Amino acid sequence: MTTAELKEYLGMVVDVEKELYTQRTLEKTMQNKIEIFRQSQEITFENYCRMHGITERNFTPRKGKPIKPEKPAEAKESYDCIKWASDETEKISATKIIGILVASLLFPPIGLVCLGIWGYRKYQKEREIEKLRRDLGSMHRSAMKDYQKKIDQYNQDMEEYQKEKERCKQYREFCNEQWKQENEKIRHENEWCRNQAEPFRVILQNIREQENKTYTTCIKLYEKGNIYPRYRNYVAVCSFYDYIASGRCYSLDGPDGAYNKYDMEMRMDKISAQLNVVIKNLEAIRENQYMLYIEMKNAEEKIAALQKTVNQISDKMNVVIAGIGAVYAQGERNHSQLNARLQKIQSQTEELLKTSELAAYFEACNQRELHYMNRMNYLAGHYDNPYGNYSPV
């Protein structure tokens, strides 16, 4: 390419890079606006309790369940044991009686003495058994009185336990209801955020589609101009245009070329090669990177105008969203209704976009990029047609 053609080519690349920067800045702006309406996550019951200082102890009775006392053994069981012991004694005594009778027949005095002793011991045994029966009866009556007291206390404790258990149940139900109301509130807020963010999502989608087109054009322009990959960026091509337009360089490569001069000025810190540094110190680069300064200023003006357009669309959509919300508020909300509402917001936003300055900007970008690609095809010699060779318009 001649110097004039190189200048024209660099001007096209600078313009496409500027539009790419503008669109990326708009994309970040839309992402920030969407982030404002970020939806909250619904909370679990455990997290709700943790947030409000509620523990499992609040749902548990302060005292454990009382244990029912055991009933004392019946007096009849004790009497049966005594009777069994008495019967065993009688069995043993019958054996002895036979022996005594035999001894009485052989030695009458000894037999009479043994019978007397046996009769006296049996009499004593019966008195002991009778006394034991009276003692057991007295002990059983005392045990039953104690048992009745324990039963009365148990019934009282059980009644208090049931009341406490019911109170804990009611408190759990109250907390559960509050938790559901909290999540319902979050769902309402999320629904509102989703509706408010939807127009910006639609705009963001359109910006990204245009950004992809512009990026593709930018890559093709770099490839057609055969710029070295290291210098394929906004700052570098603006500097190259500055050098060629001001007559300081006449080509990109070579000892006196734009590549060499750019590297030398960058090493001497005369220019800044980082776009984020340029953005922060825009006025400081005015003298040494004039073309980049002008392009950045133009981009800022365009971004401000497009952001104003976005805000106007948002204001109009707020009225639309309010109207749609009033319609759907009449009935019970469900998933299909929410989807229908979002689709209506999307379609209304698309309609507003068609007649907005943003759509005009996209159309102008597409027209210029098409012209740039046609022009580069001409400069590369790819302009054959049936009627002869001529420069595309």
Image (cartoon, rainbow, N blue to C red):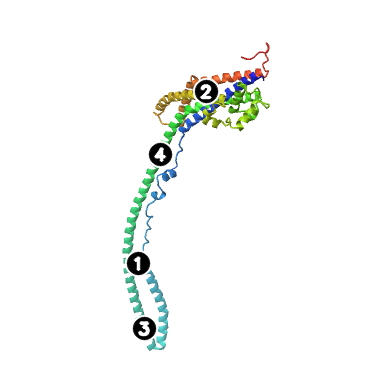
In this orientation, does residue 282 appear? no
Q: Position of residue 191 (x, y in %)?
A: 44, 32
Mark 3 vs mark 1: in front? 1
Q: Which sits earlier in the primary sequence, circle 2 or circle 1?
A: 1
Q: Is residue 43 above or below residue 336?
A: below
Residue drawn at x 41%, y 26% is: 322
- Is the C-beta separation of discs 2 and 1 under 8 Å? no
Q: CA distance from mark 4 to mark 1?
A: 63 Å
Q: Which residue is mark 4?
A: 182
Q: Which sits earlier in the primary sequence, circle 3 or circle 1?
A: 1
Q: Which sits earlier in the primary sequence, circle 4 or circle 1?
A: 1
Q: CA distance from mark 2 to mark 4?
A: 49 Å
State the residue in front, 21 or 248.
Answer: 248
Mark 3 vs mark 2: in front? 2
Residue drawn at x 33%, y 53% is: 160
Q: CA distance from mark 3 to mark 4?
A: 94 Å
State the residue in front, 185 or 216.
Answer: 216
- Is the C-beta separation of discs 4 and 1 under 8 Å? no
Q: Position of residue 337 (x, y in %)?
A: 45, 29
Which numbered circle lies on residue 75? 1
At mark 2, the secondary structure is helix
